[in-house]
Amino acid sequence: MKKPWGGRFSEEIDEFLEAFSESISFDKELAFAEIKASRIYAQALRKAGLLSEEELDQILQGLSEIEEEIKQGAFPFRIELEDIHMHVEKALAEKIGDIAYKLHTGRSRNEQVVADERIYIAERLEELKALLVDFILVILDKAEEYFEVVMPGFTHLQHAQPVLFSHWVTTFAEMMRLHLQRCLDFEKRLKQCPLGSSAFAGCGFPLDREFMAKALSFYEPTRHSVYAVSSRDFISELLFILSLIMVDLSRFSEEIILWTSEEFCFASLPDRLTTGSSIMPQKKNPDPAELIRGKSATVIGNLFQMLTLQKGLPLSYNRDLQEDKPPLFQALNYTLNSLRMATLLVKGLKLNAEKISEHLKHGYLLATELADYLVLKGVPFRKAHHVVGEIVRYAEGRKKELSELSLDEYKKFHQAFEEDVYEWLTVEHALSRRNILGGTGKRVVKEYIDCLRSELKTMVGRD
Ligand code: ARG
């Protein structure tokens, strides 16, 4: 097949190179973005007097037909046409003849491909934001459902201090809130319209770039034509955000895996969200959580692939950049699906409040309370810490809880202990002391949940 650049060539492209260099097998994902950008570009050509009204109409009509065919799955993709840009151009020519080629006036695939990618990402970002909100909302619902449940909080995976389940689980809501903010901030850099940059030197025709940016609902045109076609910074930035999300989802998954283990027994998942073993009939495995954890590795890999792709590249466009698409699409699909899966997991999660409260008895979770008690009796904290350490060792040796030691025993360790120490040795008391902003006291956790709900309303108009 004759290539659009065929004029300069005396022989046809090597068959193997043709297959080697195609990108249609993956960039067909950009088809709708390509059509959207083309529509706007055609309008700009019309505004610059480079198309007649009639020609514009024909082009727009042709583009709509192509769009419809793609939607219906009736559009033929073939590797001889290399990429999505050539496919749309060729299909348009088949429909409306040579006028189709006017659409390419002053236009280069170098700008087309980044324009398409920015449009495509802007659309997928809406999906991503909605899924982040869905996930946050189910976490908040779950936190409210089990608001009163107190669990051991961990550091180093060792029992540390009591914490409300609602506080512990909303950690993930808070992480996602920040990712949502990152998305909103990223949009400012993403939504710059490269159309009019041409191959790299800027278009030779006076196109209204402001118009094109506005028509796409972008903030502004890109300010530099070489930058516009050279850089994939916006893909790296997106992949970084996706990696952060996946890292947090992998930690969420790990919590689910731990909580539903026989050892913890904090929670269970419904059968529909677990899988069995082909050999051990009793098994009920948390595979979805493990898969999210596994997919996080892929997305992090996609980010590194993207950064490495650009490292040391000469300006401006180089064909290497064609390789930006597989990691982009993969990272988006993996992250969006992982968010969907994580949302289902939270929805289906059932707490075993009884088992959780049994765990509260172990691990001397209230040792910090004892140290704080001594501080209020005037003992310097480091000293109090040491004294309580000795008490814990003593109690452990006698297989006793802190509340089971007598006042005489306490007084042996420090004279400051009095009868009121026992008021400090309840989980409720420990929580009530932590109504500090961001802490695990019931009042502030409730406030946190309410605030986040109303913040989501203003951030993305959802509740
Ligand atoms: N398929 C190409 C890509 O994805 C489009 C740009 C091609 N530009 C060029 N000068 N060959 O990067």
Image (cartoon, rainbow, N blue to C red):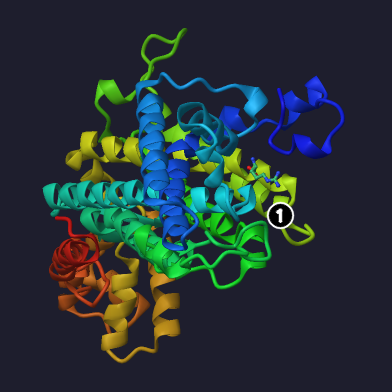
Residue 184 seen by the camera: yes
Point out the quarter of the image occupied by ligand 1: top right
User: Quadrant location of residue 458?
Assistant: bottom left
Q: Is residue 277 above or below residue 163?
A: above
Q: How many marks?
A: 1
Residue 280 falls left or right of residue 28: left
Query: Nearest the camera: 333 or 267?
Result: 333
Locate the C terminus and report the quarter of the image it occupies: bottom left
Q: SS class of the residue under badge 1?
A: loop
Q: Classify mark 1 as within 8 Å of ligand 1 or not, answering yes or no.
A: yes
Residue 419, percent from left and from top:
16, 76
Instruction: Say whether residue 249 is left or right of residue 11.
Output: left
- Above or below — where is 149 with respect to 455? above
Residue type, mark 1 in image:
Tyr
Q: Residue at x 64, y 24 (%)?
A: 79
Q: Is residue 380 left or right of residue 229?
A: left
Residue 449 percent location from the top left of the image: 18, 62
**Does residue 287 sit above or below 294 in this rendering?**
above
Q: Classify mark 1: residues with Cα within 10 Å, few (<14), some (14-19) or many (20+).
A: many
Give residue 293's position: percent from left, percent from top.
Answer: 48, 39
Q: Residue tagged by mark 1?
A: 317
Which residue is at a point 30% across and 79% down the rendered structure image? 372
